[in-house]
Image (cartoon, rainbow, N blue to C red):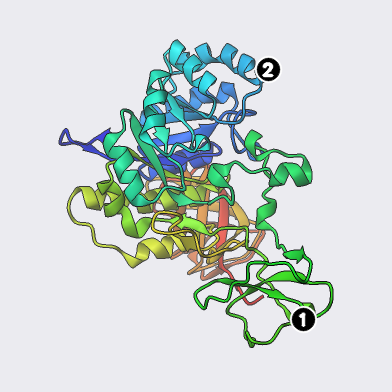
Amino acid sequence: MVENINGGFMVELLSPAGNFISLRAALENGADSVYIGLADNNMRANVSNFSLKNVEEAVDMVKEYSSKLYLCTNTIMKEEDIKKLEFDLELIKEYEVDALIVSDIGLAQLAHDVGINPHMSVQENISNTYALRTLKKLGVTRAILSRELNIWEIQNIAKNSPIETEIFIHGAMCMAVSGRCFLSYGLYGKSANCGECLQPCRKDWKLSIAQDENSDFFYEDDEDSSFILKTSKNNSSHYHLDNINDTYNKNTISSINSITPKTSFISPNDMAMIDYIPQLIATGVDAFKIEGRARGPDYVATTTRVYREAIDSVENGSFIFKDSWMEDLKKVFNRGFDTGFYFDIPYEISNQNKSEYTKKDIAKVVNYYSKIGVAELQLWDDLNIGDEILVQGKTTGSITQKIESMEINGKFVEYCKKGNNVAVAIDEKVRPNDFVYKLITRDFNE
């Protein structure tokens, strides 16, 4: 938990950052702490990460905001991995990283021995207070609880925990228990447990099960079920997974060719708990975590800002759910939303980005004139009054701006063609060479 201005304590908001732009975006939008990945030793090996050399700069940036920085080293640790990292621990300690997120109990104790706070990763699937008491003996100061726990189980554990507890409140859900999956390794030789997951679960799949005609097999015909397994009429006795909402006569055995299966049945929707922030705070956990180190700075900025507003409103006694919170969350990358295991099991499945907008790279910032709040943009795509843009940079973070005023050579214009420089009014300070994207409404019918 973090201390508020009145000396009391409130839940900590922990945001992800895959690069310096996202780190700035998280801090600018109210993150109490940010977690980053150490290259070669974290669960997002396929995206940009922070080298050991970058960590010191990241710590300095976080200190500007009186926030905290946690470093992820939560992959499976083979002998050579842990020996290499052991060599770096003193330097990590010197950089004043606030905690090391680990999934290896040996590394937890090593971190503790050099004076770094170990936080136990969700990869350990911590689901009871007995495990928490054992972790405390190893020097662990916080545990990220299993995603498979419901809200009542979390409340009971947090109430009786000897160390701090943390839970996920937003972001991607994995098809496997606490992310321990072998699908990517089995198909591509890239281990999810070593941070190399290629996410084959997000692809389209078809289920076909060969079986003898006379053997028993589970047949689901519950009207409330999302899926139904149906036998084929031919002699091969295959079973296919079909969407229960498709129109068909359940008393008629369908042929294989007539079935239109739901193909993303191993790709869960994202978690979004924005509606339930008061209930989650009431569980007594110490920290709320947003998933998404592989996602863009606009995602980090938006999710952090929305949950910051919600948490603050609960803390000051003014919480009323705002429809705009969910509308904003839908604007950035998502696969549709669900409440994970908090109240039941995840029931919706999706393999696609359900964001209402796509981002198009259209320009870069040439200059910013602080006295008049105007940025000069070099365009390589057209820009209109009324367009909504994203400006992102290492120092700027990620800001969203609707274009309400544009000038070329001192004259107001409604439209500017690509290849020109244009002056636009922007409320917040931006910097030369910041990236500029145009938000384009997504057409889901295409």
Res 370 quadrant in image: top left
Q: Residues within 10 Å of mark 2 (few under 14, many from 20)?
A: few
> Which amino acid lies under the numbered mark 1 shown in the image of this protein?
Ser
Give coordinates of residue 181: x percent, y percent.
63, 43
Judging by the rendered image, the residue that carries numbered circle 1 is: 255
Answer left or right for 283 relative to 146.
Answer: left
Residue 441: mark: none
Res 256 quadrant in image: bottom right
> Which amino acid lies under the numbered mark 2 shown in the image of this protein?
Glu
Check if mark 1's residue and mark 2's residue have beta carbons within 8 Å. no
Give coordinates of residue 224: x percent, y percent.
49, 75
| Location of residue 372 with respect to 117 vertically, above or below | below
Q: State the quadrant of the C terminus.
A: bottom right
Give coordinates of residue 413: x percent, y percent.
51, 68
**Near-viewer residue (31 or 45):** 45
Number of numbered tags placed on the structure image: 2
Residue at 68%, 67% in the rendered image: 216
Q: Residues within 10 Å of mark 1 (few under 14, many from 20)?
A: some
Answer left or right for 171 relative to 213.
Answer: left
Residue at 46%, 30% in the rendered image: 120
Give coordinates of residue 219: x percent, y percent.
63, 71
Residue at 39%, 19% in the rendered image: 137
**Near-viewer residue (381 or 194):** 194
**Near-viewer residue (172 or 435):** 172
Nearer-N-terminus badge (1/2): 2
**Element at label 1:** loop
As drawn, the residue found furthest toward the front would be 214
Q: Is residue 433 visible?
A: no
Nearest to the eye among marks 1 and 2: give it. Answer: 1
| Location of residue 270 with respect to 429 vertically, above or below | below
Alpha carbon of mark 1 to alpha carbon of mark 2: how far?
Answer: 54 Å
Judging by the rendered image, the residue that carries numbered circle 2 is: 80
